[in-house]
Image (tube, rainbow, N blue to C red):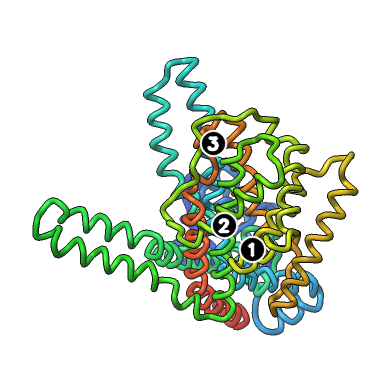
């Protein structure tokens, strides 16, 4: 049948008249008219035509008029300035979001977030799997789902990385084209395509670098195992590989330690992990029982001194014999533990011990976290005064040692500590000494810190590439490249 194509800005002017099969998809019109798909679209009776449908679907008859519309791409320097004048607040917030990964990538929080999500999924799946196995005898189904979830954790990691990198870039690209997230999707194809491709490339690079930091030692272990059964391997290859592995473990984060900013961050992570390990071990050794201040102080002091010869492969030891216990995860028990730690910190001899072992700040942050979990209506005023006192001690200590003071409720350490420290205490005792705690799921404490270090070291490199991409996308959008 014959259809007439008119331009939307001149509906009375004939653009082209063609013979076209009404049962063919509208997508075929683009090739017949030799028009680029990304630049134009068709409308009929003020309705945008779906390219996958036919003219017959829209009841278009012989000699009916179809309007040809050119897509408004936006962009360009003048358009960008006009958009800034109208939506200056959105532009400022958008640029802050777009530049935020330069900092967040360096902190190493992306992989730790992915690991925590993996723990949540694992624990949820475990409950479902146990229910299926015990109530319905679906052991095979349980094992199959378990295999799928073991693979799924890698997709969680990649997805978190992709979203963390791509979303800020998408905001930037939309701003450069003068568009909002909720605008017409047909007008967003070009900026979204640029953002998604850039995000995919940066995510691939991030995963490769992070895998090298975290997985290269495993490759060396596998290589070493190939030669461990032969005399030549035992005498030559295995010792050389082991020596190289130890050297690599010490040197892989050397650049980050040399950096003035990340060096302080990494050193603090080491000490933070040390105190988490010794304090967790102390509470587990003592049991959820009403111990005296002297018993608690003696045990914690002993564990702090023993950390000087730490073995980073060790895990928290779960006691085999149970003591008379109280409700471990209750507000009262957390207040009791927090008070024991508070008195320990404020003992002159113990303060010196903590400072000499560079654990004073981690101890205060741990104490504040415990107090926050203990707050209820009856003790709120008392605990708030204790938290204020501890914050003051942390601030004074930081200023006295020329360190940057960050209130614990504004930093990421306290949130992570609540999960790694407080949740672990609940798991160990409430679940009848079940070793399937959060730290055991994510690895031992030092392994968790290594996840953050690997993420931060990867972020050092990725933040540079990310900044280059942001600058490139800014100018490409400014000059209407995409």
The part of the image, by quadrant, that contains residue 177 is bottom right
Question: Disc 3 on helix, strand or loop?
Answer: helix
Front residue of this view, candidates 143 and 317: 317
> Alpha carbon of mark 2 to alpha carbon of mark 1: how far?
8 Å
Q: Is residue 385 left or right of residue 250?
A: right
Disc number for residue 304: 2
> Alpha carbon of mark 3 to alpha carbon of mark 2: how far?
32 Å
Residue 415 percent location from the top left of the image? 67, 54
Q: Do the residues under discs 3 and 1 have CB atoms within 8 angstroms?
A: no
Residue drawn at point x = 40 percent, y = 25 percent: 141
Residue under numbered circle 1: 354
Residue drawn at point x = 45 percent, y = 44 percent: 152
Residue drawn at point x = 59 percent, y = 42 percent: 424
Q: How crowded is mark 1: few (under 14 residues within 10 Å), some or many (20 or more)?
A: many
Residue under numbered circle 3: 123
Front residue of this view, candidates 325 and 121: 325
Position above or below: 29 against 141: below
Outermost top residue: 136
Q: Do the residues under discs 2 and 1 have CB atoms within 8 angstroms?
A: yes
Residue 207 percent location from the top left of the image? 43, 62
The part of the image, by quadrant, that contains residue 392 is bottom right
> Does label 2 or label 1 sit earlier along the sequence?
2
Q: Which of marks 3 and 2 is in front?
A: 2
Question: Disc 2 on helix, strand or loop?
Answer: helix
> Does label 3 or label 1 sit earlier along the sequence?
3
Position above or below: 194 against 113: below
> Does label 3 or label 2 sit earlier along the sequence?
3
Q: Is residue 289 left or right of residue 318?
A: right
Q: Nearer the viewer, mark 3 or mark 1?
A: 1
Q: How crowded is mark 3: few (under 14 residues within 10 Å), some or many (20 or more)?
A: some
> Alpha carbon of mark 3 to alpha carbon of mark 1: how far?
35 Å
Q: In this view, does 57 lie to the left or right of 90?
A: left
């Amino acid at each position: 049948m014959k259809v007439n194509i008119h331009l939307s800005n001149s509906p009375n002017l004939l653009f082209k008249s063609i013979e076209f099969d009404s049962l063919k998809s509208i997508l075929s019109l683009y090739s017949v008219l030799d028009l680029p798909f990304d630049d134009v679209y068709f409308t009929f009776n003020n309705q945008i035509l779906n390219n996958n449908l036919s003219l017959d679907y829209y009841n278009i008859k012989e000699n009916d008029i179809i309007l040809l519309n050119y897509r408004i791409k936006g962009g360009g320097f003048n358009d960008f300035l006009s958009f800034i004048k109208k939506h200056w607040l959105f532009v400022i917030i958008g640029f802050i979001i777009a530049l935020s990964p330069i900092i967040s990538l360096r902190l190493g929080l992306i992989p730790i977030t992915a690991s925590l999500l993996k723990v949540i999924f694992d624990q949820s799946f475990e409950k479902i799997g146990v229910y299926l196995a015990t109530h319905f005898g679906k052991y095979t189904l349980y094992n199959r789902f378990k295999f799928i979830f073991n693979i799924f954790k890698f997709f969680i990691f990649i997805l978190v990385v992709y979203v963390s990198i791509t979303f800020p870039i998408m905001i930037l690209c939309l701003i450069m084209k003068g568009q909002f997230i909720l605008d017409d999707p047909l007008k967003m194809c070009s900026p979204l395509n640029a953002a998604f491709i850039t995000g995919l490339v940066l995510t691939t690079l991030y995963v490769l670098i992070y895998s090298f930091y975290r997985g290269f030692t495993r490759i060396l272990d596998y290589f070493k195992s190939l030669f461990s059964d032969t005399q030549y391997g035992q005498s030559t290859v295995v010792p050389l590989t082991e020596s190289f592995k130890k050297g690599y473990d010490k040197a892989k984060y050397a650049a980050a330690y040399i950096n003035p900013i990340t060096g302080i961050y990494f050193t603090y992570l080491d000490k933070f992990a040390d105190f988490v390990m010794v304090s967790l071990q102390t509470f587990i050794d003592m049991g959820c029982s009403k111990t005296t201040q002297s018993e608690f102080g003696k045990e914690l002091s002993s564990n702090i001194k023993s950390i000087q010869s730490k073995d980073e492969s060790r895990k928290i030891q779960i006691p085999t014999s149970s003591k008379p216990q109280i409700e471990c995860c209750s507000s009262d028990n957390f207040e009791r533990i927090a008070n024991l730690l508070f008195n320990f910190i404020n003992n002159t001899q113990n303060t010196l011990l903590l400072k000499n072992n560079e654990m004073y700040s981690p101890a205060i942050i741990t104490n504040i976290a415990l107090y926050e979990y203990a707050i209820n209506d009856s003790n709120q005023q008392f605990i708030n005064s204790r938290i204020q006192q501890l914050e003051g001690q942390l601030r004074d200590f930081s200023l006295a040692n020329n360190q940057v003071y960050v209130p614990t409720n504004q930093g990421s350490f306290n949130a992570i500590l609540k999960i790694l420290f407080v949740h672990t205490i609940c798991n160990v005792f409430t679940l009848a000494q079940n070793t399937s705690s959060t730290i055991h799921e994510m690895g031992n404490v030092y392994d968790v810190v290594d996840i953050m270090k690997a993420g931060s070291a990867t972020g050092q490199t990725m933040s540079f590439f990310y900044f280059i991409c942001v600058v490139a996308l800014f100018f490409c959008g400014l000059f209407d490249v995409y």
